[in-house]
Image: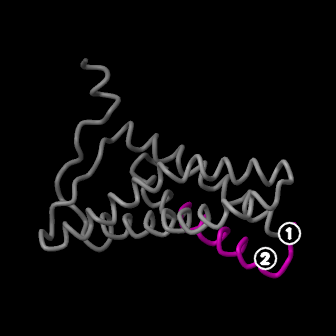
């Protein structure tokens, strides 16, 4: 495995988180609290591994800009910007939701989970979509920007 394998691994981790989130939702709707808890913990761990791999990849390689096709760039940027904003917003929501569940404050957990779950789903699904757009559907031919590690070393 090389650093160049991480985008695919990240997409797979996002996809797996989506599966766990979906199953967790289905289980709680059926009243299976144990299966729900296990799926949500699995989604959390999967997302944490994703975030670690994502940071390692971008610290070492920089970012890839979407240039072509130009007609699709505004659509891509809309997806990317909403994904990034909600990825930042979702982090404290996930921690609050988990905290309330761990403290068995289930009514408060449910109140915040109704916001956390759909936002987390959106971030997970758009993470896979961004990978597909950037690396599979419209692979970008330009070289990535200078890695963060090199930027820090030269400053």
The answer to which image quadrant residue 24 occupies is bottom right
Q: Is residue 27 shown in magenta?
A: yes
The answer to which image quadrant residue 60 occupies is top left
Q: Is residue 139 shown in magenta?
A: no
**Image point 39% across, 51% down: which residue?**
4
Which mark sits nearer the N-terminus, 2 or 1? 2
Q: Which residues are magenta?
A: 13-34
Residue 33 against residue 146 in the figure, above or below: below
Which quadrant: the C terminus? top left
- Front one among 20 and 93: 93
Q: Which mark is residue 33?
A: 1
Left or right, residue 94 beside residue 87:
right
Label 2: element kind: helix
- Front one among 124 and 7: 124
**Are there few (<14), some (14-19), or many (20+) residues within 10 Å of tag 2?**
some
Q: Position of residue 129 (x, y in %)?
A: 40, 70
Q: Position of residue 85 (x, y in %)?
A: 40, 53
- Front one among 128 and 150: 128
Left or right, residue 13 beside residue 87:
right
**Image point 45% across, 56% down: which residue?**
86
> What is the magenta segment's predominant secondary structure?
helix
The reply to whether dot 2 and dot 1 touch (C-beta < 8 Å) is yes
Q: Position of residue 145 (x, y in %)?
A: 22, 42
Left or right, residue 69 beside residue 25:
left
What is the residue that sits farthest to the top in this orientation?
Answer: 155
Residue 118 against residue 53 in the figure, above or below: below
Q: Position of residue 48 (x, y in %)?
A: 60, 48
**Image point 59% across, 69% down: which residue?**
18
**Image point 72% across, 61% down: which residue?**
40
Q: Which mark is residue 27?
A: 2
Count of numbered circles in the view: 2
């Amino acid at each position: 495995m090389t650093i160049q394998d991480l985008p695919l691994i990240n997409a797979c981790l996002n996809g797996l988180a989506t599966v766990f989130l979906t199953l967790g939702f289905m289980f709680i709707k059926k009243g299976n609290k144990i299966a729900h808890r296990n799926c949500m913990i699995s989604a959390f761990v999967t997302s944490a591994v994703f975030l670690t791999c994502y940071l390692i990849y971008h610290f070492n390689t920089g970012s890839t800009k979407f240039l072509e096709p130009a007609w699709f760039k505004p659509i891509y940027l809309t997806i990317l910007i909403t994904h990034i904003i909600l990825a930042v917003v979702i982090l404290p929501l996930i921690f609050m939701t988990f905290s309330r569940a761990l403290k068995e404050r289930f009514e408060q957990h449910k109140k915040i989970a109704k916001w956390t779950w759909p936002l987390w789903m959106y971030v997970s699904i758009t993470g896979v979509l961004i990978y597909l757009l950037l690396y599979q559907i419209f692979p970008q031919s330009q070289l990535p920007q200078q890695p963060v590690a090199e930027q820090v070393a030269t400053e």
